[in-house]
Amino acid sequence: MLELVDAGLAYGSRQLWSGLSLRVEPGEFVAVLGANGSGKTSLVRAILGLQRLTAGTVTVTDGIGYVPQQRRVNLLTPLRARDVVGQGLDGHRWGLGRSAGRTARIRAALEAVDAAELADHPIGVLSGGEQQRVRVAQALVAGPRLLLCDEPLLSLDLRSQRTVTALVDRRRREAGTAVLFVTHEINPVLPYVDRVLYLAGGRFRIGTVPEVFTSAVLSQLYGVPVEVVTVNDRILVAGIPQAHHE
Ligand SMILES: Nc1ncnc2c1ncn2[C@@H]1O[C@H](COP(=O)(O)OP(=O)(O)OP(=O)(O)O)[C@@H](O)[C@H]1O
């Protein structure tokens, strides 16, 4: 679905990461975490072909669904939520046109993110969280083989976070969609994650949650003492340098 081999990315003399090799299998859920500015969005852009790697290679399947990092939509945008979701079909399913099949797929995609009642609302008047759910529906409507999500949980309340994460999880289990999920917080995706790619300080670590979320590993990545504790099935991390917080 996705393979990076010895990949590196630099902007001028600033190296974000290098020597990154990662193969994501069908149905696998990989979370990408890391400090602000560590290059998570740049990685997603490189996978989409929007950003050229400065070293190594990236190979991806056809059929990518993409949830971009959130931007608020202009209030006057003349599109309804259903039109935004429909854009996820255009260019993929030429035969569908304005057919009943198309309408049904858009409705099902909106229902899956708990947003059926928003179908006819202009996208610009929806709240940030509602817009985000519509974007997830757009990314999934064409049935992608690889789903790239760039902080899809941002500005979602707990219930919407659960709706989105559970939906993505179901999709990868039922349809074998591979998932690369950029997130600031590990806890909302903890029940679903197979592996984590953690980027910090120009370094990275790939592994399962218990392998990566240890005091030793995060201290090594950040270059300062970082403490990881698990309380009631939640992972708490203390000591990440202030500059790396939001
Ligand atoms: N096109 C570009 N040209 C030069 N520098 C860039 C470009 N795009 C991103 N950068 C820089 O590269 C660094 C990584 O940016 P990126 O958006 O990939 O980080 P991120 O990990 O997604 O951060 P955040 O968690 O804050 O969203 C930042 O310091 C950013 O300023």
Image: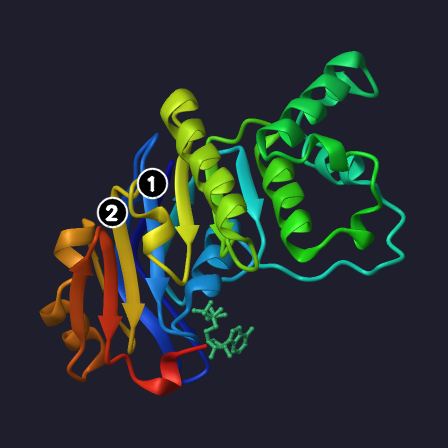
Instruction: Residue under label 1, please give it.
Output: 29
Q: Circle 2 sits in a helix, a strand or a loop, which is it?
A: strand
Name the residue type under label 1. Phe
Frontmost residue, 223 versus 240: 240
**Residue 190, position in %: x, y?**
29, 47
Q: Identify the image quadrant of residue 174.
A: top left
**Residue 27, position in %: x, y?**
34, 30
Q: Identify the image quadrant of residue 169.
A: top left
**Residue 217, position in %: x, y?**
14, 68
Frontmost residue, 185 versus 51: 185
From the image, which quarter does the N terminus lie in? top left
The response on whether ligand 1 sits within 8 Å of label 2 is no
Q: Is residue 232 above or below residue 242?
A: above
Q: Are marks 2 and 1 in contact (CB under 8 Å)?
A: yes
Name the residue type under label 2. Arg
Q: Residue at x 57, y 48 (%)?
A: 67
Q: Is residue 89 visible?
A: yes
| Structural crowding at the residue carrying mark 1, measured as other residues with C-alpha within 10 Å and reported as few (<14), some (14–19) or many (≥20) | many
Is 95 left, or right, of 133 in this rendering?
right
